[in-house]
Amino acid sequence: MVRKILLIVALLVMISCQPRIHEVKDTDEIMGTYVSVTIHDHDQAKARQAMDMAFAEMRRIENVLSIYDNSSEVFTLNEEKTVKPPSSELSDNLQKAIYYSNLSDGAFDITVQPILDLYRSSFRDSNRPPSPEEIDSALDQVDYRRIVLNDDAITIGKDQKITLGALAKGYAVDKAASILEQNGIRHALINAGGDMRALGNKYQNNAWRIALENPRDKGEYIAIFDISDKAIVTSGDYERYFDENMSFHHIIDPRTGYSARELISVTILADRAFDADAISTTVFVLGKEGMQLIESIDGVEGLIITNDKEILRSSGLDHLSIP
Ligand code: AMP
Ligand code: MG
C-alpha cells in the first residue's frame, strides 16, 4: 500500500515537473486571405517572437508580389513591363512559374491577368460575361513564352500583365516556415487560406489533422489528412468567382480564355507549399488528365473532385478513408 502511494506521488511529481506545452496562435489578413499560424512550444515568449517574425516576413513578401499595391515590384512590372534588377523574391516566383508552364505545356500561365481583368470589368459594368470576341482579344495577350527572365532584368510583352495568385501564397508560407525553423520552432502549422505547411507534428507526436471540406456543402468532410513536415494546398472554383453559378471563376484555362470547368477542387500534398500551390492550379486547369502529372512528380500526391462529384486520388493516397 505504502509502495503504491509512493509510486503515485512519484508519478505526480514527474508530471508536474514536465514543462508545459503552450499553443500560441494568431491570424492576420495577408495577400487577400486570412493567414493563421499555430505554434506548439514549451517557451511561450520564444514562440510569440518567432510568430511575429513569420508574420512580418509574409507581409514583406506581399509588399513585393502584390498586383494591387502600387508600390510593389509586380505592380511596376505590370505598368512599366520591365524591372531592373529584379528582387530574388520576384525571380524565384517567375522561375517557378515558367518551370510549371513548360511542364504543363502552358496550362499554367501567369500572364492570364488580362482575362481576369476582362471578367471583372464586364460583370462590374454590365453584369454580363464578356463576348467571345472580347475573350479572344484578351487571349492574344496571354503567353508565358514572352516573359524574358535574366539576372539583371525581367521583361514582359508591352500588352501583358502577370498575376502570381497561383503560387505566391505557397512561397510566402514556405518562407514563414523557414523563419519559424530558424528560431527554434519544431511544431507549427501555417495556413494561408487553404495553403498549409506543417512543421514537424503537433506535440506528443500527433500529426496535424487537416479536414478537406466538401466544396459544395461546407460542414461536410470529403477526407481527413494527417500530415507532418508536409505542405497541403487546395485550389477551388468557389474561392473567387464573378457570376452566380461560378461559370466565370478565377482559374483560367489559357488554351480557351474561359474558366477551367472539369474540376471543382484539387488538393495537392508535397514537401513545399510553393510547389504544391503551383501544381494545384496547374492540375485544376488540366482536369482529370492532371492526375498523370501528379503521378509523374516524386513525393507529390493529390485528390481531385470533378464537377460531377467524382473523387479521384493518386496512388499514394490509397489508405485515405473517404466517407
Ligand atoms: P490558386 O488558388 O492557387 O489555384 O490560384 C488561383 C489564382 O491563380 C487566380 O486567382 C489567378 O490569380 C491565378 N491564375 C488563374 N489561372 C491561372 C493559370 N492558368 N495559370 C497560372 N495562374 C493562374
Ligand atoms: Mg495554386
Image (spheres, rainbow, N blue to C red):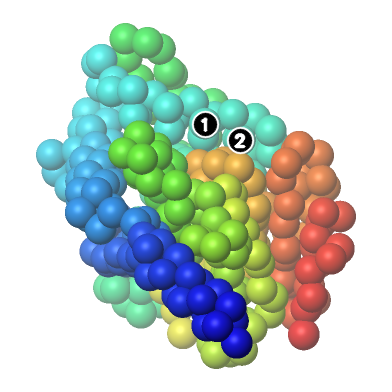
- The number of numbered discs placed on residues in the rendered structure image is 2
> Is residue 244 at least partly visible in the picture?
yes
Q: Position of residue 199 (x, y in %)?
A: 49, 49
In the image, is 148 to the left or to the right of 48?
A: right
Q: Is residue 200 left or right of residue 279?
A: left
Work out whether residue 131 or residue 63 is closer to the camera in this orientation and state it.
63
The residue at 36%/40% (across/down) is 184
Question: Which amino acid type is shown beneath numbered disc 1?
Answer: Lys
Q: Is residue 137 above or below residue 44?
A: above
Q: Which mark is on residue 269?
A: none
Q: Quadrant of the C terminus?
A: bottom right
* Residue at image point 59% right, 54% down: 228
Circle 1 residue? 96
Query: SS class of the residue under badge 1?
Result: helix
Q: Position of residue 220 (x, y in %)?
A: 61, 89
Image quarter (top left, top right, bottom left or bottom right) of the N terminus: bottom right
| Residue lying at 27% horizontally and 73% vertically, measured from the top left | 125
Label disc, if present, on residue 100 of the rendered structure? 2
Place of residue 238 in the rendered image (x, y in percent of width and height, measured from the top left): 51, 75
Residue most extreme to the left? 71
In depth, the one of 291 and 57 nearer the eye is 57
| Secondary structure under the numbered disc 2 in the rendered image | helix
Q: Residues within 10 Å of mark 1 (few under 14, many from 20)?
A: some
Horizontal side of residue 53 vs 229, given as left or right: left
User: Mark 2 and 1 residues: CB-CB less than 8 Å, in contact?
Assistant: yes
Q: Quadrant of residue 79?
A: top left
Amino acid identity at mark 2: Tyr
Does the beta carbon at disc 2 come under 8 Å from ligand 1? no
In this rendering, the answer to whether 262 lies above or below 45 is below
